[in-house]
Image (spheres, helix red, strand yellow):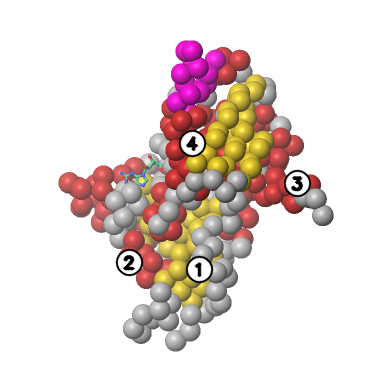
């Protein structure tokens, strides 16, 4: 039997648990997670290597986390949906994930339309079954309803947060992928540069610690990232849209900014395994989400191009 490999795109509504699943399968925090919808803005990759075993040739599963599928109403939203389509186009398999605890509403419809239009085979994950604990029976009608659509090769109940059903899932993924090469070395677990992941970890703290429109109208750009052997120096700008948001982000006597900085620094230190010196600045940029140019510049792929171009030859 041959080694199996391929690209698997994780697709679903905001908050279904896509990033939680990516992290759980990759065994590391590659994507930030928060209870707020539209946490993920760019697609990101996580590589899972399944070792060779008895009667099992091993597999490499390249997972692609995507922003939640939604109807965009600004440049940021349109960019996020373009990220979703690009991830789907290049995939061997689509993994649709729905929140089983709230799948009653027509929530998944928009996602189902995308799957219907695509030629790529799809599996369905009913996530958050830990929330259905006392009402297991509720799963059966859900499974029935989704199987009637005849869109999915398999329907698998899981809990991404409690890591339930993930072994079954990995096995099915390996079997569903074609015979193929190692696309990545065993050490490479993501395509995201640490510089960008650091920005995400700062944004995660903004998401977790602020409320209402502030998290959605905020973005983070790394201005300086200097890797020393014992210390990494990072300077980052948190952009928001209004003066009032800036005041919230700074907080009384700078308390909020201090807390965001401390928590983010600890997370970045955990990721890098070295001490970090983190400096945060806050800038107001009115309507940045409406600016196509600015939104494009936020994409780490774009930032990487500039960094490479600016490198002394
Ligand atoms: N109870 C429960 N919560 C989950 C599960 N998976 C994800 N969540 C939570 O759902 C929220 C959204 O998760 P996230 O991964 O950011 O969703 P995404 O927008 O689809 O990427 C977070 O608060 C997660 O902790 C699960 O299996 N069970
Ligand atoms: Mg996400």
Q: CA distance from mark 3 to mark 2?
A: 42 Å
User: Which residue is label 2 attached to?
Assistant: 168
Percent coordinates x, y for residue 231 in the rendering = 55, 42
Q: Which mark is residue 306?
A: 3
Boundaries of the magenta span: 247-260
Image point 35% across, 84% down: which residue?
55
Kindly report which numbered mark, 2 or 4, lies closer to the viewer in this rendering.
4
Label 2: which secondary element:
helix
Name the image quarter holding residue 78: top right
**Going 20% across and 52% down the picture, which residue do you hit?**
137
- Label 3 vs label 2, nearer the camera: 3
> Magenta stretch containing residue 253, yes or no?
yes
Q: Which of pointers 3 and 2 lies earlier in the amino acid sequence?
A: 2
Is 57 magenta? The answer is no
Mark 4 falls on what kind of element? helix
Q: Which residue is mark 1?
A: 186
Q: Earlier in the sequence, mark 1 or mark 4?
A: 1
Label 4 with label 3: CB-CB less than 8 Å? no
Q: CA distance from mark 1 to mark 2?
A: 22 Å
Q: Is residue 147 left or right of residue 70?
A: left
Residue reaching furthest bottom? 1
Callout 1: SS:
loop
Which residue occupies 61% across, 63% down? 90
Pinpoint residue 96: horizontal percent, then vertical percent: 45, 56
* Residue 27 pos. (x, y %): 40, 57
Q: Which residue is mark 4?
A: 265
Image quadrant holding the N terminus, namely: bottom left
Q: Position of residue 183 (x, y in %)?
A: 57, 70
């Amino acid at each position: 039997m041959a080694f199996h490999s391929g690209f698997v795109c994780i697709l679903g509504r905001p908050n279904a648990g896509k990033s939680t699943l990516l992290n759980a399968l990759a065994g590391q925090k590659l994507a930030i997670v928060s209870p707020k919808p539209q946490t993920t803005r760019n697609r990101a990759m996580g590589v899972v290597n399944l070792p060779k075993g008895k009667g099992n040739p091993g597999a490499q599963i390249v997972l692609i986390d995507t922003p939640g599928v939604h109807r965009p109403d600004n440049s940021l939203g349109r960019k996020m949906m373009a990220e979703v389509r690009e991830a789907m186009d290049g995939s061997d398999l689509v993994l649709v994930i729905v929140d089983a605890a709230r799948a009653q509403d027509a929530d998944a419809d928009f996602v189902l339309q995308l799957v219907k239009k695509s030629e790529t085979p799809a599996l369905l994950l009913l996530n958050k079954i830990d929330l259905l604990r006392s009402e297991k029976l509720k799963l059966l009608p859900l499974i029935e309803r989704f199987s009637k659509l005849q869109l999915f090769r398999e329907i698998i109940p899981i809990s991404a947060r409690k890591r339930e059903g993930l072994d079954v899932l990995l096995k099915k993924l390996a079997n569903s992928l074609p015979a193929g090469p190692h696309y990545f070395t065993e050490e490479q677990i993501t395509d995201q540069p640490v510089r960008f992941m650091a920005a995400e970890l700062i944004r995660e703290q903004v998401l977790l610690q602020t409320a209402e429109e502030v998290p959605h109208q905020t973005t983070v750009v790394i201005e300086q990232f200097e890797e020393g052997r014992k210390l990494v120096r990072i300077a980052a700008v948190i952009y928001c849209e209004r003066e009032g948001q800036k005041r919230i982000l700074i907080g009384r006597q700078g308390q909020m900014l201090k807390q965001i900085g401390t928590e983010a620094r600890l997370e970045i230190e955990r990721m890098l395994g070295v001490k970090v010196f983190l400096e945060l600045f806050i800038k107001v940029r009115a309507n940045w989400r409406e600016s196509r140019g600015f939104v494009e510049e936020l994409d780490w792929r774009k930032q990487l191009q500039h960094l490479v171009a600016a490198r002394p030859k």
